[in-house]
Image: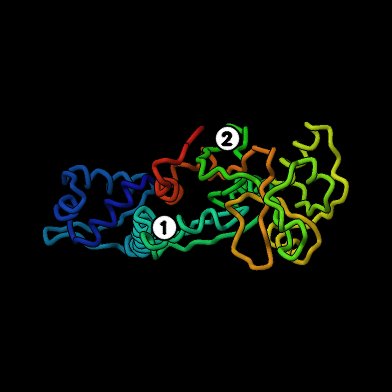
């Protein structure tokens, strides 16, 4: 059974004749008659009784009409849902961020523009977020560093120097800055494996042939910041992630110029989805997009 045949049958039943059904379907009357005739012939049934007064549904026709009604109601409902999704009046956008502070301004503008769209924001380190993108559990990721995998579409959000965050009451807080060599000899708070901050710090130490002498590993940026506030050591983070806190001071690392970049990512295969595309296009014109 072809969809066009069932649609022709349904239209004839609803409008009480082939002529009016043809007008509503924007078809010729012979075309509508042919669809219904082939449907009847294929299954060896009679769906209408035809007379000079018009057409009437047979018993089989009434049963089929009830089924067709449910199908076309569902089809109409599906089209309405998809139309709302196209205009972002319905649906959901899930964003994963290694530091929510980088994406919240854009997210606020997006919500003002599309208030009916459900938005979910989750956090994780760069490695975790790339995995979530790949298994479709998030739509967009904001991570430190651009992945080399060509499966991702990437747009740079910002680039900031790395700083050492320390307890304000510490003697170190009185310094204007410190060198990378000095940094390696101090108690350091390391993020978990998968963190871009940790990777950059360890790569730079290896490049210089230096060993970190005193470290403690703490999962999540917020926990690392709190650990620094409690005097457990220095936390390394980008300058853009330093939030006002009277307990903390940020020190420049005078001879380490490697920046911390933040990128907005999505899978190329999903970049055409309207909700994802709309979020990407809200990025300032100065942002850099690359494939």
Residue at 18%, 50% (x, y): give it: 22
Residue at 29%, 62% (x, y): give it: 58
**Do callouts 2 and 1 mark residues in contact (Cβ within 8 Å)?**
no
Q: Nearer the viewer, residue 282 or 40?
A: 282
Q: Please, which residue is most extreme toward the right here?
A: 213
**Mark seen at residue 151:** 2
Give how far across and how far down residue 154 sits, in percent: 53, 39
Give how far across and how far down residue 64 sits, in percent: 36, 60
Q: CA distance from mark 2 to mark 1?
A: 25 Å
Quarter of the figure with residue 262:
top right
Residue at 84%, 46% (x, y): give it: 185
Q: Nearer the viewer, residue 197 or 131?
A: 197
Local packing at callout 2 (Cα closer than 10 Å; few below 14, some 14-19, many 20+) is: few
* 95 displayed left or right of 8: right
User: To which residue does mark 1 refer?
Assistant: 110
Give how far across and how far down residue 132 sits, in percent: 63, 49
């Amino acid at each position: 059974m072809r969809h066009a045949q069932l649609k022709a049958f349904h239209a004839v039943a609803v409008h009480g004749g082939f002529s009016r059904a043809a007008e509503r379907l924007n078809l010729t009357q012979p075309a509508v008659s042919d669809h219904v005739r082939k449907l009847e012939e294929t299954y060896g049934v009679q769906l209408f009784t035809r007379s000079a007064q018009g057409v009437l549904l047979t018993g089989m026709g009434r049963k089929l009409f009830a089924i067709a009604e449910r199908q076309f109601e569902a089809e109409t409902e599906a089209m309405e849902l998809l139309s709302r999704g196209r205009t972002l009046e319905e649906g959901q956008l899930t964003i994963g961020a290694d530091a929510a502070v980088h994406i919240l301004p854009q997210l606020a503008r997006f919500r003002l523009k599309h208030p009916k769209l459900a938005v979910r924001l989750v956090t994780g380190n760069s490695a975790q977020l790339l995995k979530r993108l790949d298994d479709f559990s998030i739509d967009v990721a904001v991570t430190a560093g651009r992945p080399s995998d060509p499966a991702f579409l990437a747009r740079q959000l910002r680039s900031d120097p790395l700083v050492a965050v320390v307890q304000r009451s510490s003697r170190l807080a009185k310094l204007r800055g410190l060198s990378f060599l000095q940094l390696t000899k101090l108690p350091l708070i390391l993020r978990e494996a998968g963190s871009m901050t940790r990777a950059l710090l360890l790569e730079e130490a290896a490049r210089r042939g230096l060993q970190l002498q005193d470290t403690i590993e703490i999962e999540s940026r917020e926990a690392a910041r709190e650990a620094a506030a409690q005097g457990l050591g220095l936390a390394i983070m980008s300058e853009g992630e330093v939030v006002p806190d009277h307990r903390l001071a940020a020190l420049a690392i005078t001879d380490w110029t490697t920046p911390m970049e933040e990128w907005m990512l999505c899978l190329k295969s999903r970049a055409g989805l309207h909700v994802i595309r709309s979020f990407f296009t809200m990025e300032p014109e100065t942002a850099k997009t690359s494939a």
